[in-house]
Amino acid sequence: MSHDPNCVFCKIIAGAIPSARVMETPEAIAFLDIGPLNPGHTLVVPRSHHPNLPAMPDDLAGAVGVLLPRVCRAVKSATAAEGLNVLVNTGAIAGQSVEHVHWHIIPRHRDDRIAWPWKPSSYDDADLEAMRSQIAASLAAEST
Ligand code: 5GP
Ligand code: ZN
C-alpha cells in the first residue's frame, strides 16, 4: 500500500483529516467532495496512493471499478438526480488538483449550474486512421 505523507487524500484515508464517508472497502473509500458541483458530489478514492489513473496498477483499477455502479446508484437515489457525470481528471491541464487518483460522481439535474457538453471537434478520414493506428500500436506495444 503506497502512502504519501503530503497528500490530502492519504491524510483523509488515514483519518488525520475528517471526511464525510459514505463507503469503505479494503481497497477504497468514498466521501463527499468538500466543494461539491452539486449536492451529493462524491469522490471514490483507492486507499493506496497513485498520482493518477495511468499510473494505477490494473488490479487496483479493477477493484475500484467494480464499486462504481453501486456508488452511482446510491448517489443518484439519495439526490434524486436525473443523471450523473462520472469523471477522472488526469493532470493539471485537465483540472486535476489532488494528485491521488479519484473518481468524481456528480449528480446532474435539469438546468443545473454545470456547463456541459464540451464542444466536440471532428476528424477527416486520414487523421482518424492515423490516430486510430497510433493508439492501437501503443496498446499493442504495452501488451507484448
Ligand atoms: P480534482 O480537481 O483533482 O479532479 O478533484 C479534487 C477534488 O477534491 C475537488 O473537487 C476538491 O473539492 C476535493 N477536495 C480537495 N480537498 C479536499 C478535502 O480536504 N476534503 C474533501 N472532502 N474534498 C476535497
Ligand atoms: Zn495520496
Image (tube, rainbow, N blue to C red):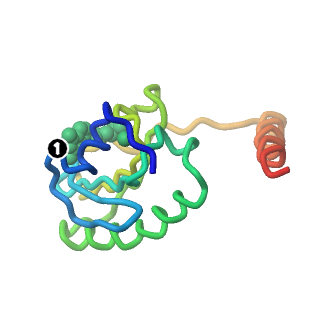
Image coordinates of residue 38 in percent, x first then y, are: 20, 51
In terms of secondary structure, where does tag 1 sit? loop
Image coordinates of residue 125 in percent, x first then y, are: 81, 39
Image quarter of residue 22: bottom left
Q: Is residue 101 visible?
A: yes
Q: Does the beta carbon at disc 1 come under 8 Å from ligand 1?
A: yes
Image label count: 1
Image coordinates of residue 5 in percent, x first then y, are: 32, 35
Q: Residue at x 28, y 51 (%)?
A: 13
Ligand 2, image quadrant it occupies: top left
Task: Check disc 1 and report the residue beneath it.
Answer: 17
Q: Residue at x 33, y 56 (%)?
A: 105
Location of residue 107 with respect to 37 vertically, above or below? below
Horizontally, is 32 left or right of 124 in the view? left
Task: Estimate how packed mark 1 is, as few (under 14), some (14 to 19) or many (20 or more) residues with alpha carbons within 10 Å.
Answer: few
Q: Amino acid at mark 1?
A: Ile
Q: Is residue 36 visible?
A: no
Image coordinates of residue 17 in percent, x first then y, are: 17, 43
Horizontally, is 120 left or right of 104 in the view? right
Work out which residue is located at the far top of the displayed protein and give it.
93
Q: In the image shown, does 130 or 122 lie closer to the viewer? A: 130
Horizontally, is 65 left or right of 85 in the view? right
Location of residue 44 with respect to 81 vertically, above or below? above
Location of residue 48 with respect to 8 vertically, above or below? below
Q: Residue at x 19, y 50 (%)?
A: 15
Q: Residue at x 48, y 63 (%)?
A: 65
Q: In the image shown, does 112 or 1 lie closer to the viewer? A: 1
Location of residue 73 with respect to 52 vertically, above or below? below
